[in-house]
Amino acid sequence: MSASLISALPPCGNEPPMPDEWRLYRLATRLSTFANWPFTEDCACTPERMAEAGFVHCPSDNSPDVVKCFFCLKELEGWQPEDDPMDEHKKHSPSCLFIALKKKAEELTLSEFLKLDLERTKIKMQKQMNQHIENFQAKANVVRGHLEKLDADETQ
């Protein structure tokens, strides 16, 4: 199939139901997350360039400049006006397949899109699994501490 999947979809305001992650393949969707981005003019990391590099803006009260690649899920903060978003993305996540694309996401065929999104899904699942493992290990350490305390109390 040679038709582009994303460009065949209706404009952002009138989209059929689809996963939010798929909407993020669209530059306009990523760009819309940068409404309160602190760097807008006379700098390298404008909202447009951030979105082109695959980032979405996900600020917090303590970190107003946190961004995350929608594809590889790499989070970056501490931006300076002269930072180039694509260079920073490549430096901190060189294996990100989104920044390695040789064409715009809107130009992907259905087959290319599905293969690419399979990789994004694997990355997301791996990150979730790692988080579950970390949580389990933290809880196991607490339980281990309680058991060791009980054992110490019984041996006294």
Image: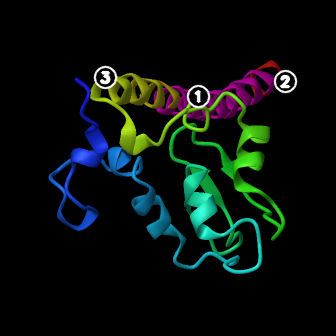
Amino acid type, mark 2: Gln
Q: Is residue 59 visible?
A: no
Question: Residues in magenta?
Answer: 124-152
Say few, some or many: other residues with alpha carbon within 10 Å of mark 1 (under 14 / 14 to 19 / 20 or more). Answer: few
Q: Are there few (<14), some (14-19), or many (20+) residues within 10 Å of tag 3? A: some
Please tell me whether residue 146 belongs to the stretch shown in magenta.
Answer: yes
Sequence-wise, the earlier of marks 3 and 2 is 3
Measure the alpha-carbon separation of dots 3 and 2. 67 Å
Q: Is residue 113 magenta?
A: no
What secondary structure is found at the residue carrying circle 2? Answer: loop
Q: Position of residue 27 (x, y in %)?
A: 45, 56
User: Which amino acid lies under the numbered mark 1 shown in the image of this protein?
Assistant: Asn
Give x and y (percent) for residue 54: 56, 49
| Disc on res. 111 | 3
| Vertical placement of residue 78 versus 53, above or below | below
- Frontmost of labels 1 and 3 is 3
Numbered label tally: 3
Q: Is residue 5 left or right of residue 95?
A: left
**Looking at numbered disc 3 in the image, what kind of residue is underneath it?**
Ser
49 above or below 98?
Answer: below
Q: Is residue 144 left or right of residue 29?
A: right
Marks 1 and 2: which is nearer the front?
Answer: 1
Q: Quadrant of residue 56?
A: bottom right
The residue that disc 2 covers is: 156
User: In the image, what residue occupies the spot 34% across and 51% down?
Assistant: 23
Q: Residue at x 56, y 54 (%)?
A: 52
Residue 130: percent from the left, percent from the top? 59, 28
Foreground pick, 36 / 50: 50
Residue 111 appears in which quarter of the rendering? top left
Q: Quadrant of the N terminus?
A: top left
For label 1, the residue is 130
Query: The residue tagged with tag 1: helix, strand or loop?
Result: helix
